[in-house]
Image (spheres, grey):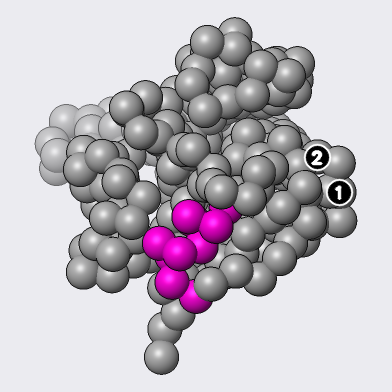
Amino acid sequence: MRRVIVDSAIYRDGRRTEGPADLSDALAEARTSGNAFLWVGLHEPTEAEFDHVSDEFALHPLAVEDALKAHQRPKLEIYDDSLFVVLKPVVYEPESDRVSSDELMLFVGDSFVVTVRHGEGAPLAAVRSRLEAEPEVLKHGPTAVLYAVSDTVVDHYIDVAGELQVDLEELEADVFAPVGVHPSNTAERIYTAKRQVLEFRRAAGPLAAPMVRLAAGDVPFVHESARPFFRDVSDHLIRANEQVEGLDRLLSDILSAHLAQMGVRQNDDVRKISAWAAMAAVPTMVAGIYGMNFEHMPELTWTWSYPALMLLLVAVEIGLFRLFKRRGWL
């Protein structure tokens, strides 16, 4: 049976403690026991499955609707009883050189944090384990979870940008490869890479404003002492977005170079065809003249007219061939 609630625990003074199985009792215990909070992680819940969680934590209906439907832009929304943050982790698939994005939502409120994950590309088990190994960080409550998740997502942006950079350098080398080595599907690969970069930009670009706001420190349910940490995440995000912009410009340059090369190669092909057509036109024209069967053609009675004409045609063809060769048409 599929587990909707992947993990649930109370963290007291930065250390994990197993609380009541009932979410209402667990939240009440976290709120009454001092420096504690409840962290509930969910994976692709249905509306019926999420109803119980949203009721227990008094989550805003609009935020709940966004968390269930997914397909949201990265954003930060503030409600009376909670903070709603949407992140879009990106995943690089080395087998297919593809970039895909999933969705990760966080509800942060008084003594609780609820994470809702859509897709398989953003598992939070590693983040939870890392935080549990750092109680000094985790004791700052839900703010620590929000920071750790955001930091992990943004750092992975930089890793994926590096992978894409390697792919584009290989694509650039293929575009400028010698004729004959040049792959036949280069244009398709360029447009596919364009779509990957666009997917990346949709994930990373809109997240800049929420990170700046979190770094400013005027967001409820976020500890004031976390401002420098979110500022660091914002700086990393700026770097990732600059890398994405650079990749997009590089792709545009690669596409322009490829189209220019295609134009040059087409012109070369046209010149070659024109040169061979001109060389074929000379004997065709002569054969057409002598095929008109006129009686009064002086050359018809000459003994050496046929071999002389053949030699003349050969000389003309050789002359045309050398001329076109010298001008680079052949």
Q: Residue at x 27, y 55 (%)?
A: 55
State the residue in front, 5 or 186.
5
Task: Please name whichever residue, 323 or 73, is drawn nearer the observer in this view of the structure.
Answer: 73
| Residue furthest out toward the front | 32
Mark 2 touches mark 1? (CB < 8 Å)? yes
Q: Tell me: residue 189, above or below residue 110.
A: below
The tag on residue 164 is none
Q: Is residue 147 left or right of residue 64?
A: right
Tell me the amino acid under the disc marked 1.
Glu
Q: Position of residue 328 (x, y in %)?
A: 64, 22
Residue 181: horizontal and vertical position, in percent? 70, 49
Q: How many marks?
A: 2
The percent position of residue 202, horizontal first and vertical second, equals 43, 32
Residue 66 picture quarter:
top left
Tell me the tag on residue 137: 2
Residue flagged by tag 2: what amino acid is it?
Val
42 vs 327: above or below:
below
Q: Relative to 285, does residue 116 appear above or below in the rendering?
A: below
Crowd band around label 2 with a 10 angstrom C-alpha radius: few (<14), some (14–19), many (20+): some
Callout 2 secondary element: helix
- Note whether 178 is above or below 251 in the view shown: below
Whether residue 203 appears in this view of the structure is yes
| Alpha carbons under labels 2 and 1: distance apart | 6 Å
- Give the main secondary structure of the magenta stretch: helix
Splitting the image into 4 quarters, where does residue 1 fall? Answer: bottom left
Residue indicated by mark 1:
134
Q: Which residues are magenta?
A: 21-30
The residue at the far bottom in this view is 1
Please indicate, yes or no, whether residue 304 appears anywhere in the rendered image.
Answer: no
Residue visible at 52% across and 10% down in the picture = 218
Check disc 1 and report its element: helix, strand or loop: loop
